[in-house]
Amino acid sequence: MNAAVAATHAGLSPAELVAVRADFPLLARTVRDGKPLVYLDSGATSQKPDPVLDAEQDFYLQRNAAVHRGAHQLAEEATDAFETAREHVAAFVGARPDEIVWTSGATAALNLVAYGMQNATFGSGGDKAARFKLAPGDEIVVTESEHHANLIPWQQLCQRTGATLKWISVLDDGRLNMAELATVVTDRTKVLAFTHASNVTGAITDVAAFVARAQEVGALSVLDACQSVPNLSVSFADLGVDFAAFSAHKMLGPTGVGALYGRRELLEALPPVATGGSMVEVVTMESATFAPAPQKFEAGTQMVAQAVAMGAAAQYLGELGMDAVYAHEQELAAELLKIRDIPGVTIIGPLDVQDRLGVVSFVVDGVHAHDVGQILDAAGIAVRVGHHCAQPLHKRFKVASTTRASVSVYNTVEEIVAFRESLATVRAFFGMS
């Protein structure tokens, strides 16, 4: 790394970045006839460092047993590892351990809230769940930036309860139309569900303004934190949100596990969605009573090894320091945004690094996104192509698909330069000037 490049790394020193990359064994492999891998698809799923891989393997090698049942040593150790992981994840996102519910991912976490509200609407949970009931005339508000996981559950909930779905639009620069916050969110709004950072534009939402408006009208705030938790310092308690969802596999952890954050009193009042073993207190042939949250939302055998590995991922990122991670990725984002100078390339989203992540989607005039992706792949550069599970947002910008480059803590400026150089050849490859 030359001195000029090194000077741009305000977040991580060159030595720290080398050490980080050494923790990710997959980054050492080559692709497409021996080319070095440039992985710019962390917005879809991140690579995993050795401490995460080791934590999952160690659980199976040394502690594998069912948790919260059994009195033998392995069961005790497994339960300790499972609950310690919950403590690590909770600390990482500024929550109490009993405010973290294990789920199979962020999608499941968002569906848990939606289906819990549906259950409350139809009578489950008794009087304490009345705050979640919906009726015709009530409104749920989302944004035009949402990916499908934070849109479809609310569509379905409206269809089942008679509530109305409304949304806040996106401006031409990819940021949310904040002027609509006061007009779209009204006294009829019962839920305000919004992304912390768009997986298409990378734009970061003004969470404080959204939470303030939700509280002003008495609505629940639900934060989709899939893209933010891996890339910047997040404290749900400080943000003041009621619920938040995030997944492990985007924050250097394994697939198949994620978490729902919920304020303690809300988790206690929300009816469970899945029922069965491990989430009960007393069961008779006629009825059952449920355990306190978060256990009442964790029916059946949980993804224990994956949860333990998610806890390791939280520790790993925490030790790096999320301010340093974000600063490093801001430098990378600035390098990514230089593709705006390539003829024929148009970025979908903010053109500067102010309040955005290193997630940059773009179109190349006259070339389909899949063809762009294939040409980059031939150079060893992995990006995402398609609609990124955000079809309405793509429709907003009148494009069927985009190419997306997204960074993580392990990426380097040199990789972004290689990406730009390959992208600059795309139109010429198809005979365009």
Image: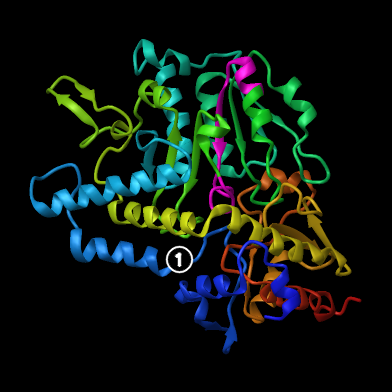
Q: Quadrant of residue 370?
A: bottom right
Residue at 58 percent of width and 16 percent of height: 218
**Residue 225 shown in magenta:** yes
Residue at 76 percent of width and 39 percent of height: 170
The percent coordinates of residue 228 (x first, y second) are: 58, 48
Identify the image quadrant of the C terminus. Answer: bottom right
Residue at 38 percent of width and 48 percent of height: 88
Comparing 401 with 297, the one in front is 297
Q: Is residue 82 left or right of residue 353?
A: left
Comparing 232 with 6, the one in front is 6
**Residue 404 shown in magenta:** no
- Vertical side of 3 occupied by 300: above or below: above
Q: Is residue 312 left or right of residue 193?
A: left
Identify the image quadrant of the N terminus. Answer: bottom right
Residue 371 seen: no
Colouring of the image: rainbow
Say what secondary structure mark 1 lies in.
loop
The percent coordinates of residue 205 (x first, y second) are: 68, 39
Residue at which label 1 appears: 48
Residue extending farthest to the right is 433
Residue 191 seen: yes
- Vertical side of 48 occupied by 232: above or below: above
Residue at 69 percent of width and 76 percent of height: 414
Residue extending farthest to the bottom is 33
Q: Quadrant of residue 426?
A: bottom right
The percent coordinates of residue 152 (x first, y second) are: 56, 37
- Disc 1 marks a residue whose amino acid type is Lys
Q: Residues within 10 Å of mark 1 (few under 14, many from 20)?
A: many
The magenta segment: 213-233
Comparing 369 with 2, the one in front is 2
